[in-house]
Every structure is written in C-alpha cells, then in structure tokens.
Amino acid sequence: MLWGNLTARPIRSALTVIAISIQVILVLMVVGLTSGVISEWGKRVEGVGADILVQPPNSSIFFAFSSAVMQESVGDAISALPGVDEVAPTLILMDQRNFVVVYGIDYKRFNGLSQGFLFLAGRAFESPDEAIADDIVAQSRHLRVGNTVSLLNHNFTISGIVAHGKGARFFIPLGTAQEIAGAERRVSMFYVRSKGDTEGTRELIVSLLPEDRVRTLSEYLTLMNSSNLPELKPFIRTMLGLGIVISFLVVFLTMHTMVMERTREIGILKALGSSRLDIAEFLLNEMLVIALAGSSLGIGITFLMKSILKVTTPSLMILIPPGWVFSSIGLALIGAGLGAIYPAMRAASFDPVVALAYE
C-alpha cells in the first residue's frame, strides 16, 4: 500500500525526492568546499618546510589577506638568534583577477627551508619577469615552460613547473613582488626553520618581536579546522538552516496535498478500524521512504560532482568528512519530519463520517 501510494503520483514523488536531494547536496558541498580549502591550505603551509611562522599583529591565518607591513630587515635579526637555522621573508599577494595566491620569495632562502622545490619541468626564475608555477595550476590553466602568464597586471614567463604543496600556486622574485605591491623592503611574513628546539626558538622570537604574532607550525595546523574559525560558523549554520527550510517546505506542501487528496481513503481506513496512531504512522513512514531516497540521491550526486570537479577543476579541493554524510541524512530527516508532522496529525484527527462524505 505504501509503495502504491508513492507510485500513484510518480512525478510528485520524484520532485519531492529531488528537492530533498538538493538539500543534501547543498549541505555536503558547502561543508566539503570549506573543509577542502582549509585542509588543503594547511597542507600547503606545512609543505613549505618551516616550523615557525612570524606575522604582523592581528594577522589572519589565511595569508592571502596579509599586508606587507613587516620590514625585511627583521629577517636578519631573526636569523641572528641562536636557535634559528633559516629564515625566508615572503610577500604574499592575491591576484584578484585569477583568484590565486602568489608568493614573492627570495628563492635561495625559501628553497632552503626544506628539501627544495621538486621541478617537474624547467628551472628556477633568474630574471625579474620570470615565475614558477605549481603543477595543479599549470594543469588547470594549460601552462608550459616558456608560456607567458598575466599575474597582478604584470606579464611573467613561466621558467619552471614544480610539484604542488609549497604554500602558493605561483612564485615570483621578492623584489618584483615588492615593486608591484609598492612595498619597498617590506614583506608579509617570515617562514622560520629552527635547529630543533622549536618552542625554545619561538620564545626567543617572541622576546625579539613581542608585538608580532609568532606561531609554531603545529599550533597553526590546529587552527586550520572549520570548527575553529568563527568567521565560517555563521555561514555554515545559515546554509544548514536553509537546507532544513527547503526540506520542510517541500515536504509540508507535499504531505498537505497528499492528505487532502486521500481524505476519503483515510476515512475508509478509520472506518475499518485503523487508529489515529496507525494513520499517522502510515503517512510518516511514507515520508521516511521519500526522505531516505532523496538523501541517497543527494549523496550520490554530490560524490559524482566531486569526481567531475577533480578532473575539470583540479585546483578546487573538496573534502567531505564521513561524519557529515550521516549528518546530512539526519538534517534531511529532521526537515522532512517537521514538514510531515502537522499533515499527519491532521489526517489522524479526521472524523471517519466526515471523511467518507468528503468530495
């Protein structure tokens, strides 16, 4: 009987399933995009090879929003500390046109933080108008060594392509970055590698620069979580609330119409001895099937979209935590349940005599 009712109005049932799947897709894609961007950014910072980050006061953990306010000479003072092994001054610029992060670096010092860039093609930049690109942006923009690319309203020749995971997508000479930004002898931050005693070296840097923000890499990575970012919480909650509202409205409208169409059927069931609980349970079970079908469809479409975007837009990282898959199902059930309660209660309260006389 339950399946018969669902197939009696196949288009309406299908549209309800699709609407619920949209809610699930909305939730998973919002969470997946935010989690993916944050996680991928943290891995790229970790891949630089530093274990201490020195930034100006009140700076954002998202380096793209950093300003070039630190004197480059501060790096020499940090280098003189006994626990410091290497310091790399870095000017971070955001190319608004291409929405990509560009690092202005002293190649020798930045490369010395770790085992160095892994070149897949080409070489390091040697002139002010040359740039290095990582393999992800090179793939997405079809770049090859020798190609010209416009960054920050300036034309650069790609001198090399490196493996991704070193902080930015593009790297240009520090002097060129300072000239473009109008930040002579200034940088956005310093990557620092200690000689082993990370915490001790951090304390020395704090003593030298008490007003600046000095974090160890491990401390920074703990912050790279959407639950630790108050700026993202309202956005995620808004999207979740919107998803629940969509599910509630669709289910409420569907159930209300369904109850009106089945008034005589409900009267017959009650006349045959069905209790109010039986009627309500029957309608709620029907909506449970629709909600689960919508959730399954939404999850399937989400992972299909993730696979497609991974191929078409490799620079867009989507990370869907397993817990959120079940949370999205729970949210769909909550929205559907809220939308189904009133129509189900109304159907259960019908007087069988009035229901049988309903036209």
Image (cartoon, helix red, strand yellow):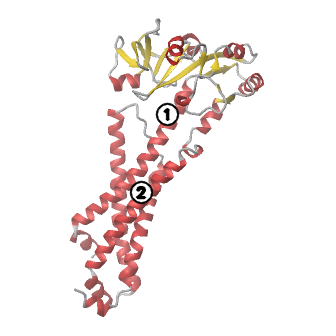
User: What type is the residue that disc 2 sits on?
Assistant: Gly
Give the side of residue 11 with respect to residue 127, left or right. Answer: left
Spot the residue most to the front.
182
Residue 231: which quarter of the image?
top right
Split into 4 quadrants, where in the image is the N terminus? bottom left
Position of residue 210 relative to residue 156, above or below, is below
Q: Pointer 2: what residue?
A: 243
Q: Secondary structure at mark 2?
A: helix
Give the side of residue 113 with respect to residue 268, left or right. Answer: right
Q: CA distance from mark 1 to mark 2?
A: 26 Å
Q: Residue at x 26, y 83 (%)?
A: 265
Position of residue 6 relative to residue 173, above or below, is below
Position of residue 261 relative to residue 65, above or below, is below
Q: Residue at x 22, y 64 (%)?
A: 11
Residue 159: which quarter of the image?
top left
Which dot, 1 or 2, sits closer to the camera? 2
User: What type is the residue that disc 1 sits on?
Assistant: Glu
Residue 255 visible at all = yes
The image position of residue 315, as x and y in percent, is 40, 31
Position of residue 229 relative to residue 176, above or below, is below
Which labelled disc corresponds to residue 40? 1
Q: Residue at x 42, y 61 (%)?
A: 245
Spot the residue most to the bottom.
353
How crowded pointer 1 is (Cα within 10 Å; few <14, some 14-19, many 20+) is rated as many
Give the side of residue 119 with respect to residue 208, left or right. Answer: left
Q: Secondary structure at mark 1?
A: helix
The numbered mark, 1 or 2, whose residue comes first in the sequence reads 1
The image position of residue 267, as x and y in percent, is 29, 87
Split into 4 quadrants, where in the image is the C terminus? bottom left
The image position of residue 178, as x and y in percent, is 54, 15
The image position of residue 134, as x and y in percent, is 43, 21
